[in-house]
Image (cartoon, grey):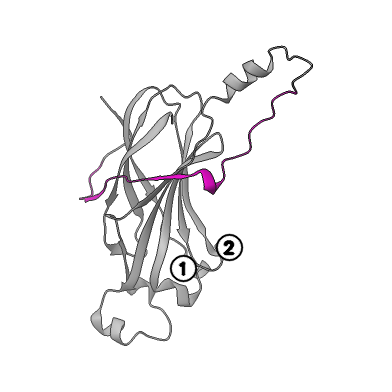
Amino acid sequence: MSAVNLTNVAVLDNPAAFLSPFQFEISYECLTPLKDDLEWKLIYVGSAEDETYDQLLESVLVGPVNVGNYRFVFQADPPDPSKIREEDIIGVTVLLLTCSYLGQEFVRVGYYVNNDYDDEQLREEPPSKVLVDRVQRNILADKPRVTKFPINFHPENNEHEEQAPHSPDHGTETKQPPPSPDHATEANIKGEERPLSPVSSVRVQ
């Protein structure tokens, strides 16, 4: 059972200009105390064919985390259009929100993002060079794809077990490799849009 469960992600300020910051209100619960920080990342997929165009927009550490319910606003800068191929700026792409513990990713939320001009004439007759300041993004907030990965939230327990004496008939237990996507499970997280509000990192009582 996971020590941390993502309970809701609300997309704020959506739709918005392509060059506007991203903002997500993230709610989660912690079922067992964690000694280290949770790492949240936001990744913009710049090309469906080449992951080298992916951009890490922001990475934040939250913790240590005690048992309880939490909510905070995660803000990230927009992608750098100069690092995206011209033909990939307009159209549909993917935004990935991930959370990891001790370098192990345990949940990933994927959103489709539609980028298009904010003017009908520009949409019908797009200029040869993309006018980034006229591009608007729309995150499909009501259709997130959530994938969960099983990880070890308490590796210190394994260390205690390894210190116990072993019989000659049994080899020492090796550390488990990171979970592969084949062991991932999908779940539905309620996605919703809310008006922008000045919410800071808080614990929900």
Mark 2 → mark 1, Cα distance in angstroms: 14 Å
Quickly name the residue at label 2.
Answer: 52
Q: Mark 2 falls on what kind of element?
A: helix
Looking at the image, residue 52 lies above or below residue 125: above
Q: Which residue is located at x 41 percent, y 32 percent?
A: 4
Magenta residue check for 173: yes
Looking at the image, residue 98 lies above or below residue 162: below
Q: Which residue is located at x 27 percent, y 39 percent?
A: 199
| Viewer-side residue, 137 vs 188 | 188
Residue extending farthest to the top is 165
The stretch of residues the image draws in magenta is 171-198
Magenta residue check for 6: no
Residue extending farthest to the right is 168
Q: Which residue is located at x 52 percent, y 34 percent?
A: 151
Q: Position of residue 13 (x, y in %)?
A: 26, 55
Q: Residues within 10 Å of mark 2 (few under 14, many from 20)?
A: few
Q: Position of residue 76 (x, y in %)?
A: 40, 51
Q: Residues within 10 Å of mark 1 (few under 14, many from 20)?
A: some
Residue extending farthest to the front is 169
The amino acid type of the residue labelled 1 equals: Pro
Q: Quadrant of the N terminus?
A: top left
Quickly name the residue at label 1.
Answer: 81
Looking at the image, residue 119 lies above or below residue 38: below
Q: Mark 1 falls on what kind of element?
A: helix
The amino acid type of the residue labelled 2 equals: Thr
Viewer-nearest of discs 2 and 1 = 2
